[in-house]
Image: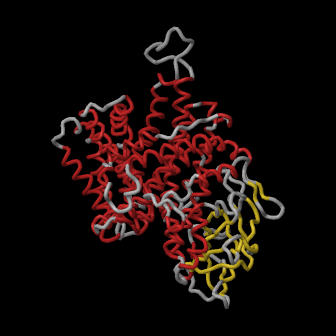
Amino acid sequence: MPTYTAPVSDTLFLLSDVFDYAKYANAPGFSEAPVDVVEAVLTEGARFVEEVVQPLNRVGDLEGCKRNPDGSVTTPKGFKAAYKAFVDGGWVGLASDPAYGGQGLPTFLAVLFSEYANAANIAFSMYPGLTNGAAAALMTHASDELKSRYLPKMTTGEWTGTMNLTEPHCGTDLGLIKTRAAPQADGSYTITGQKIFISAGEHDLADNIVHLVLARIDGAPPGVKGISLFLVPKFLPDADGGIGERNGVVCGAIEHKMGIHGNSTAVLNYDGAKGWLVGEEHRGLHAMFVMMNGARLGVGVQGLAISEVAYQNAAAYAKDRRQGRALKGPAEPDKPADILLVHPDVRRMLLEIRAFNEAARAFMVWVALSQDEARLSPDPKTRQAAEDRLGLMTPVLKGVFTDYGFANAVKAQQVLGGHGYIAEWGMEQFVRDARIAMIYEGANGVQALDLVARKLPKDGGRAIMAFIGEVSQFLAAAKGDAALAPYLGGLQTALGHLQQASMWLSRNGLKDANNAGAASYDFMHLLGLTALGYMWARIVKAVLAKQARGESDPAIDAKLLLAKFFSERMLPETGAHLARLSAGAASVMALPAEAF
């Protein structure tokens, strides 16, 4: 059976030493989260997910969710009690507005906790995760009446939330949706249609489920310009705000999926269900993007989470399992065989996973802090810079993290050999669970297109130029640092590749849109690798500073070796990405459709 230990000490190192958390001490929104509070929250959160949530991961995979004849759904054994403990512990509303029952802590803290929760059990963690996303959309766009009626119970987790976008005939192309909304005399709407792939769409964990549904008001313009967003509860609240009559939304089926079996991915049938408009008519996609952007960051964190838990179990196996002998001769002649770690290729796989994990966690902290800066900073320039960073890096974090998350789960499975293919060891579940993250909340190819077509040229390329400028300034400032300089050559090369790629796209993307499309995936990964390299450079700088102060320890010292491995063995991939994207779209688009 797999195990999991949340990397609390590594998270705290990143906050304190790499990102200088002390500078936020007097910043708006951070006063309730001094470093000792942050440490206490993360430590307790780690204990909770390790002891309560993680043991249910395999249970959820084996049992799955069951739809009953009346359309209700029963979650796996233990989920309901664990969810109640999650709610009672205040974990749902960790960063939510105290006016609605939240704890009012900075957003970054909820993001960091979400890594631990998802590593422990992705399927379980999606229930509160989706609720937070739905609540955020309501907080931004709903009327005061809807907020007062629904947010208090959603903030605490007493009621859960969902997002309803996909229909049988359309996924990414939301302009094709057919779900209809008919206005009523009392200001409500009746919602009719079918939604599929609705995560946490029906379950027994909470008293009510609040669905956010994209639909088209009768007579609305075609395409995405005619889409509106509606709040449709499973049960209509009564006069006292409690559970009233059943609404016209029913679970028609539970999807049979490759992974995340513990989450009820539902087909929802809306038959004249009563709903209320959220935001403006025909501006539903704009309102839903609050939830979608948050969800994309959340799914990116899932990629890191799976990569981390897979690494922990593969590394433990490699330190215990004995197979073969070291290439230079027996490492332990008195034993029948050497441990797997004597083999260079086993080390390669484990190092590739861990080198990604540590840089990706830094990337996650960087982006999470940017969320709070964009929302709370009194300085307009700081807010703008943070907003630019978020816009540019959200598709990168989602696409790159989940691609690596799946690939790393496969590598970890490979370390276990035949046992990795056997269910009881847990590795094959990690592989199956990781796969969906590359697809939902916008497939990774769509994330790449969003990056290249929208985020890159936005505001005259201000965001990408700011990132290149930030890394360039870091490299320039480090030139005189003899200890740091040996770790920066790979980053300098990668930054050059990123600049060349950006210039190539600016010259060739407008000439032929297919050039931008064919280059987008490689550009996303080139930018992602460069950002991860920048994170490693900042980590190394912090480690060297700790060593100079005499505060080093073996775990900290190991980061220097990991940084060198990343620079020598992983960062050179930016050159391959540059070569591929610079080839243009000709060979990609040349083969006629009938030849496929």
Position of 90 with respect to 391 (left or right) is: right
- The image's colouring method is secondary structure
Residue 472 in percent (x, y) is at 23, 52
> In the image shown, does 471 or 294 lie closer to the viewer?
294
Q: Nearer the viewer, residue 139 or 175?
A: 139
> Is residue 107 among the parts visible in the rendering?
yes
**Residue most extreme to the bottom:** 185
Q: Position of residue 178 (x, y in %)?
A: 65, 78
Q: Is residue 69 above or below residue 225?
A: above
- Asked if residue 523 can be seen in this view, the reply is no
Q: Nearer the viewer, residue 590 or 273?
A: 273
Pinpoint residue 583: horizontal percent, then vertical percent. Answer: 38, 56
Image location (x, y in percent) of residue 315: 51, 31
Is 279 situated above or below 234?
below
**Vertical comparison of 252 with 340: above or below:** below
- Return the residue nearer the eye: 298 or 85: 85
The picture quadrant where one finds residue 72 is: bottom right
Give the total number of marks visible in the rendering: 0
Describe residue 296's horizontal placement relative to residue 14 as left or right: right
**Which part of the image, by quadrant, shows the C terminus?**
bottom right
Indicate the quadrant containing the N terminus: top left, top right, bottom left or bottom right. top right
User: Residue at 48% across / 56% down in the picture?
Assistant: 398
Asked whether, in this view, residue 342 is left or right of residue 244, the answer is left
Q: Please, which residue is most extreme toward the left here?
A: 480
Furthest toward the right, the residue is: 69
Q: Residue furthest top?
A: 334
